[in-house]
């Protein structure tokens, strides 16, 4: 059983393994994305906050998923879409499942670490966001319709950035 976000290894869009321990000491916003969703323009807002905070130890980790039937693209086509249409510079990983029994181990962990009281919080749609502090702990999550550059999200990011790892 994973003890922190740093126990996971994921694949990038080229299929190369990436250890999340490489992100130790950084504040992370993990988000499931899709190119054919009404929330897809949030990629622009995500890029805006990435540019604003990345120099302070902030990273966005995006995980494309077709769990909601809105990500038909694969591999390099996902990256090209994100870069061409939204100028995305943050890391986009391999497409995978984010909910249910088929969810990746990372997303099972995020779901287990997030809750509404007694209920766990799996992604309810594309663009659900999970905030991870510098110590690798999931400290908050935001519904898919909450704009990435909203006051609530930016305030939470800024609070995490103030903390020492």
Image (cartoon, rainbow, N blue to C red):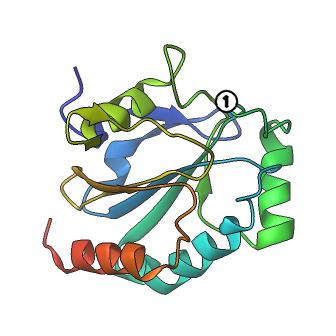
Q: Residue at x 79, y 65 (%)?
A: 83
Q: Residue at x 86, y 67 (%)?
A: 84
**On the rendered structure, is 30 left or right of 78?**
left
View extreme (left): residue: 164
Q: Residue at x 43, y 81 (%)?
A: 53
> Is 86 drawn above or below residue 141 in the view shown?
below
**On the rendered structure, is 136 left or right of 131?**
left
The percent position of residue 14, horizontal first and vertical second, equals: 71, 38
Q: How many marks?
A: 1
> Is 72 drawn above or below residue 46 in the view shown?
above
The percent position of residue 149, horizontal first and vertical second, equals: 52, 79
Q: Residue at x 44, y 33 (%)?
A: 107
Camera-nearest residue between 3 and 15: 3
* Residue 5: quarter of image: top left
* Residue 94: quarter of image: top right
**On the rendered structure, is 135 left or right of 15?**
left
Q: Residues within 10 Å of mark 1 (few under 14, many from 20)?
A: many
Q: Quadrant of the N terminus?
A: top left
Instruction: Classify mark 1: helix, strand or loop.
Output: loop
The percent position of residue 161, horizontal first and vertical second, equals: 26, 76
* Residue 139: quarter of image: bottom left
Residue carrying label 1: 67
**On the rendered structure, is 102 left or right of 77?**
left
The percent position of residue 165, horizontal first and vertical second, equals: 15, 65
Camera-nearest residue between 69 and 164: 69
> Is 97 drawn above or below residue 91 in the view shown?
above
């Amino acid at each position: 059983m994973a003890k922190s976000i740093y126990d996971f290894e994921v694949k990038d869009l080229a299929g190369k393994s990436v250890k999340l321990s490489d992100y130790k000491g950084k504040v992370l916003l993990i988000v499931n994305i899709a190119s054919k969703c009404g929330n897809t323009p949030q990629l622009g807002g995500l890029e805006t906050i990435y540019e604003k905070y990345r120099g302070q130890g902030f990273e966005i980790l995006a995980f494309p998923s077709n769990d909601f039937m809105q990500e038909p693209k694969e591999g390099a086509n996902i990256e090209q879409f994100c870069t061409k249409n939204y100028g995305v510079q943050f890391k986009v990983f391999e497409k995978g499942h984010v909910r249910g029994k088929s969810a990746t181990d990372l997303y099972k962990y995020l779901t287990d670490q997030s809750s509404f009281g007694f209920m766990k919080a799996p992604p309810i749609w594309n663009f659900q966001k999970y905030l991870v502090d510098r110590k690798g702990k999931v400290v908050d999550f935001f519904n898919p319709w909450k704009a990435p550059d909203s006051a609530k999200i930016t305030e939470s990011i800024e609070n995490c950035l103030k903390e020492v790892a």
